[in-house]
Amino acid sequence: MRDTGRWVDSRWNASDLHYTFGTNTKVEFKSFDSVGKAQAAGKRDVLFINEAPYVQYEIADALIGRTTEDIWIDFNPTSEFWAHTEILPNKDAEFLLLKYTDNEALPPTILDELMMKLDKAYHNPAMGNVAGNIKSSYWANWCKVYVDGEIGSLQGTVFQFTQCGQIPLEAELLAYGIDWGFTNDPTTLVAMYRINKTLYLEELIYQTGMRNVDIATKMNELGISKQVPIYCDDAEPKSIADLNSLGYGNAQRAYKDRINTSIDLLQGYELQVLSSSLNMVKEFRNYRWETDASGKSTNKPIKSFNHTIDPLRYIATNTLIGATGEYYLM
């Protein structure tokens, strides 16, 4: 809107996240972590659900039921989900496939990245997904979803998990975990709760450009406990010292074991990820085992989609296993 001269600053409400046009039409930007909040939002004329696979169907259904006109559901089809099973069978629903070739505003850098992925996926990218042309099954599946817009399959994911609407009141808060970032990678803060053999996982901070004082301020706003351990990536001892001086004396260096040890620990539990933890849900969906040149899975996880998973591993290593290697699975 700014580029085309349509934006008027006075019409933007930054606190409630809505823009009112001269015609009195209002666009609201909302997120919901419970059915109750979705129901309480009232009615609307048009609904646009972005990144729909990361939205619980019950929440989407509550919003859809209070929309009077058009409903748009936007997604990359990493696997079949409720849009396919609950929405598309309806006679008044239409499926629209849009690919990168339909986006006239696609930045050249993103186009170059897509071409690189196609080259990783196929011996001859022009031939696409045909027998004998696949170079890497992982990247072929990635291109099937993000280049061709077809339903892919979640191959080789490290963790099996389900989403939950809230953390049970009886769940025990084990610890927090921090992974440092700044320019390219986000700083992340996560929490791990437990009931018997079930872990409940929550994303609290996922943001770039945060100084240590910003992290502490955000933690104060979130009401982060100053008694429960906060296990931090030991790559930045100065950052840990800063948090200590800013009131979080419970922030401490995380004891690190082999990556696969902490993965094994987490795999020993049923994992429930809070639905509102959108970045964490996305990472759990995409955190996979590396594959070799033939597409065969290795025993090493990929070095991406790990910004929330790494601090969860720190918690696991320091809470579910002792420094001597003794397991404490209950």
Image: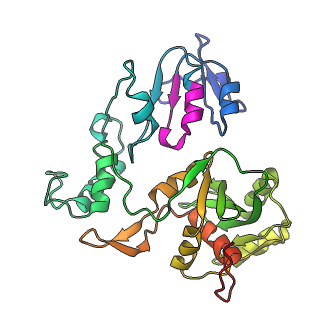
Most extreme residue toward the top, as rendered? Answer: 23
Q: Quadrant of residue 251?
A: bottom right
Most extreme residue toward the bottom, as rendered? Answer: 324
Q: Quadrant of residue 83?
A: top left
Q: Position of residue 256 (x, y in %)?
A: 62, 81
Colour scheme of this structure image?
A: rainbow
Q: Position of residue 124 (x, y in %)?
A: 14, 58
**Vertical side of 182 occupied by 235: above or below:** below
Q: Nearer the viewer, residue 50 or 1?
A: 50
Report the residue at 15% width, 51% height from top.
126
Report the residue at 69% width, 83% height from top.
322
Q: Position of residue 210 (x, y in %)?
A: 67, 58
Report the residue at 35% width, 51% height from top.
109
Task: Look at the image and give the residue range highlighted in magenta.
Answer: 47-63
Q: Is residue 62 magenta?
A: yes
Horizontally, is 84 left or right of 309 in the view?
A: left
Question: Count of labels shown?
Answer: 0
Horizontally, is 170 left or right of 46 in the view?
A: right
Residue 43 at least partly seen? yes
* Quadrant (top left/top right/bottom left/bottom right) for the C terminus: bottom right
Report the residue at 64% width, 26% height from top.
18
Q: Nearer the viewer, residue 255 or 60?
A: 60
**Vertical side of 271 occupied by 22: above or below:** above
Q: Is residue 217 magenta?
A: no
